[in-house]
Amino acid sequence: MNALLGLLLLSAPYAEARSARAVQAVALWHRGEPERAAREFEAVFRDDPRDRLSALDAAAAWRDAEEHRRARKMLEAALKLKGDDADALAALGWAELRSGAPKEARRSFAETLALEKDCSQALLGLARLELAQGKPQPAAAAAERLLAARPSDTLGWAVLAKARGALGDTAAAAQAWTRAYESDPTFVEARHDLGAAYKRLGKTDEAWRQYVKVLSADSRHPDARRQAAELRPLITKEPDAIIPARVLKAFARLFAAPKRGRMPVIRVAVGTTASGQPAPKPEVAFLSDGPFEVYDPENGKRVTDGPAREAWRARAVPGLPGYELVDSSGRRRARFSKVLAVRPKNPAAHSLIVQRLDIGAGTAWAAQGDRQLKGSLELRAGGKRGLYLVSVLALEDYVYGVVNEEMPERFHPEALKAQAVIARNHALIVKDLWKPHRKRGYDVCDGQHCQVFGGIAAETAKGRRAVDETRGQALMYKDRLAQAPYSSNCGGHTQDSGETGGWFAAPYLRGVKDVDGGESERKSPWELELWLKRSPQVYCNLPGIMHPAHFRWSRGVSAAELSERLRRRVRGFGELRRLRVLKRSASGNINKVLFEGTKGRVIIDREASIRGVFSVSSVRDTMMILELERGADGRPSELLMYGGGWGHNVGLCQYGALGRALAGHDHRKILEHYYRGTEVKSLGY
């Protein structure tokens, strides 16, 4: 693998050194000045008419500035030097389409396909051109040709769904929207369109299910709320039968981490929101597979006892302040106002199941389900909304429940060991340094806001082995606990923590390319275009092992829907007029973006907020390029996004760790690459 990577990198099409002026133009583009950057690239090209890359960079920068005629001019100049460049020819077709020259665009797409018969950009552009001209049949044919070559192309499935809908084949449109969602399960917008298709087909239950799934990701989505409310009285089954909860039918065997030394204890809120906040419930039901005791955690005094396998409930007292705990017969066993705790009498052998918790609220995979938990469980007052839950357990038991929630069990053991080390680090950093949840009575939440914890059901023998073999190991920088963020897939290049909005700078969290000896590599506009629309060979690109959308993805969002989300931030925003990327990190991630509306403007510069504003749920990553489409009236109609990776791209890349482990790297070497200058040391337990 290493030799292959080296060969591919050496054969990169634009590996030559750039002039100082070209380097400055790249910097201007990264700073959100595409017009100035484009002019500088044009000047470089005038000085050296053989410099194709500068011509292509100028074209890409003019595209970002929505100066599509100027982009055409520079693409034509580049193609005079090398006429068989399919990427440039397809880009010319898009520039012609956007500048009101559909005949020329059709010709450019045809010439591209003569060079590269399965060029995705040419086929997608042709499909959209046909659809815009009221020709859904050839649009569907072009989309089907694209999808035959690239079955996971989300934009391809979306345009096919629209073409089939325009042909009046609603059932086929529903199938295409289903495939669009399956091609990228975070593309929740496809569920909204699928719900509309099911509604037209008279499939009430299926339509209601899709709208509820949209609301699970965005409870404020206006149309999904209207549609779900309208369909609710018409569904033919009980809601639980349409969207079943994840029920644990039996207690899994408990494997407790050996209790040696002074192992830290951690407090984990379970069933939290996407922002890590408590999600109180009016009633909480739990049971144990062994006898349990109820006690006051503030003074340790026993309150009552309960038998094995009997469901008890905690709830508000009707008509009175405070809460009550009732047994399976409905008899009150305790009253409390602030907090009450439950634990098995033999915690080494028995555990608790909490029923119907909210899992992954605010995400594309939100659901309700049961959780089996070790240690003790606190029932804490959450105001008028009810009670929230805090699981208290040993750190190593906690890491057991994190490793395979954050990294699949099938991963190489050395990658899992690296994950165990940084999961331990991250928990302690959040608990003792950041302390975002301390006022609520817990150290970490159970979702992506901190790191995902699934309890006993999330444990595997392979995951526990990785935790045990790294017991007490933590990542240190100059003998202090290192902050060790991680994400699923960096898209081929991690980013500096200091460049990431809302983050912090650390010398060991520097952006690096995901190759052997990789360093930071700032890409020009055209280089980033190819980087994201193609599939470069890096450690985290693992075809056949991962879902394709983990590494490269695309999607579209209507200007109307984007405007609605922006109006939530700025009431006077109006309708979207234009947008502008104001800052990119060296890795290509968007760090700041400006949205201009008909009545106001908003700048978003926090990583999570940037990802959140572009989607019902969240786009996978900020490493992306944005292409704004306009209708015949000149107003924005749709935003196309082409992205790479999944997550914030700071620190360890999980799929990169797998690629490195498969290449023979142990967990220490893996961690050394992503956290430069750190060491793995023992915490002494």
Image (spheres, grey):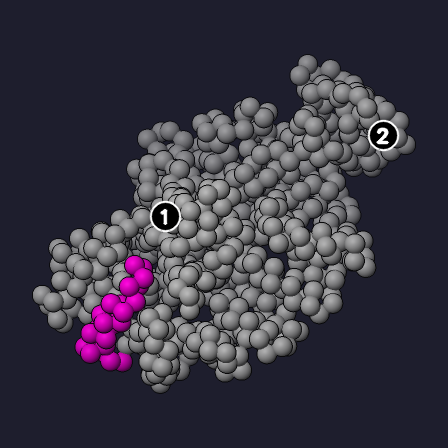
- Where is 585 relative to 299, above or below? below
Residue under circle 2? 327
What residue appears at the point 57 percent right and 57 percent down from the top-left corner?
188
Residue under circle 1? 594
- Where is 328 relative to 162, above or below? above
Q: Is residue 75 magenta?
A: yes
Tell me, yes or no, if residue 61 can be seen here.
Answer: yes
Q: Is residue 441 magenta?
A: no
**Dot 1: element:** strand
Label 1 sits on what residue type? Leu
Image-based side of 533 in relation to 81, left or right: right
Spatial CA span between label 1 and label 2: 56 Å
Labelled pair 1, 2 in contact (Cβ < 8 Å): no
Q: Nearer the viewer, residue 263 or 205?
A: 205
Give the image location of residue 434, x and y in percent. Answer: 46, 29
Give the image location of residue 346, x and y in percent. Answer: 74, 29
